Amino acid sequence: MDTKEIKSKFPIFKNKVNGKQLVYLDSANSSQKPKTVIDRISKFYSKEFSNVGRSVHSLAVTATNRFEETRDLMKKYINAKYREEIIFTKNATEAINLVASTYGEKFIESGDEILITELEHHANYVPWHFIREKKGAIIKFAKCNDKGEVDIDEIKKLITNKTKIIAITHISNVTGAIMPIKKIVDLASQKKIPVLVDGCQGAPHVKVDMQELGCDFYAISCHKMYGPTGVGILYAKKKWVDALPPYQGGGGMIEEVKKNNITFPGSPTKFEAGTLQTAEVVGFSESIKFIKDVGIKNIMKHEKEILEYGLEKIKKNNSVKIIGEPKNRGSIISFTIKGIHPHDIATILDEDGVAIRAGHHCCQILHDKMGLAASARASLGIYNSKEDIDILSNAIKKCNKIFNN
Amino acid sequence: MDIKELYQEIILDHGKNPRNKNICKDFNKDAKGHNPLCGDKVHIYLKLDNEKKLENISFEGEGCAISMASASIMTEIIKGKQFNIAKKIQEDFLNMIKEGSKLNMNSLTDTENMTMMSLSGVKRFPMRVKCATLAWHTFIEAVEGNKKIVNTEN
Ligand SMILES: Cc1ncc(COP(=O)(O)O)c(C=O)c1O
């Protein structure tokens, strides 16, 4: 893949950081945006803007059409069966909260079990914690092994007659472990337990096909998919969008409002209360087109190549310890350097224009388990090249030099 | 600026070999500080005598080189001083880190001044200011506060 050409499509790479060329290795946190996405938002505001789904004037019709086109594109992209299964939220966090609140409210009772894993991002734990508090439910954590992955047997072991939902990440945002979602769904469906997948690190990097995966819910943050901030997507199987009650109340999500009774329409309307992030949703259509143009297979192949190059290169530095050794790894390399705190690493790398993340990456349970307060994380996107890895590797050596270790 | 201005020898030395990093046995006041964004944690222990002199001060904690060095440097400098003096030093330090102003305590020795000034480079790294100031806020909390936990996010 010609990463020079890819990079040229992202205006951010024209800027210097601390006088250096930007080496962006924080895409798991949020990805950069292609010019087409940025331009689309600008064009929408300049030429097509109006609120969607409310007025009958021409602009409203155009805006509504553009907005709904993104839904159709997304339905196709993740191969959902019905367009009602695609619900816009503000991010994956809200998508998971939507499920936890509505499903939790209706189907989880005192003593029921919610099965998650030690790999989960706080976004896929805290919403369930609220339900635990509210309903007196129990959260069970499937253990992560020393390779940084969760074994399917570990999940099997924890499923009981009380298990009401399994909520798991598609790809760990720390160890990069790719979870065997299809197998987990097969296991769960034998017991009729719905499965929610936190797809934040999945959708931007691997092929996701809802009908093939078979999960009940899939949460996506579009800003990690070369899209604008403020847009998330919840895929929810038809049977659930029908069964679940509305999430938030307000305008746009009602059918009829009387003083003593209110009725609600079907999905997605009933889950999309209030004015949405219209321009961003429209802008996101260009992200899908961008990914389709490059091709998800090419993205996977390219990122794998850079990942393997990176792992090998970084492993050569004896002071570096890479976190996890999963069999199937997404585009994530978390690491520690002996004697240097991750925040110091991030500051020193930044000096060379290398943007990584340092901290617990919203996975405190996992870091506690590994006995770490924090780690450093380099995560890849379609624009990263072997040269980026070389610069990263040299910047890590600079850390060693400054800290004299 | 050069990254070496941030990671000066004095800071690296304090970061690697922190002074007064223990729980001093005679402490009568303590407070915890937490920087949730970074995960930096300090716990300050001190003994304030009847004349409000800081007879002893120590800390425990974990975090980046900047936060640990800053805690170490602070305990070294304010140990044995009157609390009202130590409080002025703290204010002076915060002004240096946040506003970039010069230290203007004339009661400090040249070495003490130099040691404190080694942290002045932090000013240029806004994301790291909280690392450098955590121990200093926590120290004041230990003496005056009632919260017992300092959280840099609120
Ligand atoms: C695995 C995972 N889940 C959830 C999230 C939360 O995403 P957002 O903050 O966009 O809702 C992230 C992003 O950091 C993530 O990596």
Image (cartoon, grey):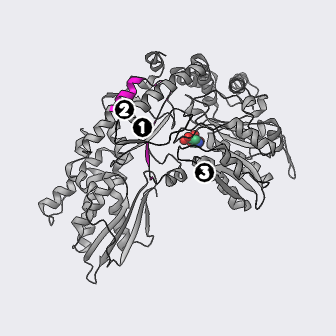
Identify the mark at residue A143; answer none if there is no mark.
3
Identity of the residue drawn at 30% across and 40% down: A399
Label 1 SS: loop
Identity of the residue drawn at 62% across and 51% down: A125
Work out whether A216 lies above or below A139. Answer: above
Q: Residues within 10 Å of mark 2 (few under 14, many from 20)?
A: many
Q: Is residue A275 visible?
A: no
The reply to whether the C-beta atoms of the residues labelled 2 and 1 are less than 8 Å apart is: yes
Ligand 1 quarter of the rendering: top right
Question: Within the magenta stretch, is there residue A376?
Answer: yes
Q: CA distance from mark 2 to mark 1?
A: 9 Å
In the image: residue B71, left or right of residue A282: left
Asked if badges 2 and 1 are on one and the same chain, I answer yes
Question: Within the magenta stretch, is there residue A230?
Answer: no
Identify the mark at residue A356; answer none if there is no mark.
1
Q: Chain of mark 2?
A: A
In the image: residue A371, left or right of residue A91: left
Q: Residues within 10 Å of mark 1 (few under 14, many from 20)?
A: many
> Is ligand 1 within 8 Å of the beta carbon of the residue shown at mark 1?
no
Q: CA distance from mark 3 to mark 2?
A: 32 Å
Identity of the residue drawn at 83% across and 38% down: A239
* Mark in the foreground, 3 or 2: 3
Task: Residue type at mark 2: give it.
Answer: Leu
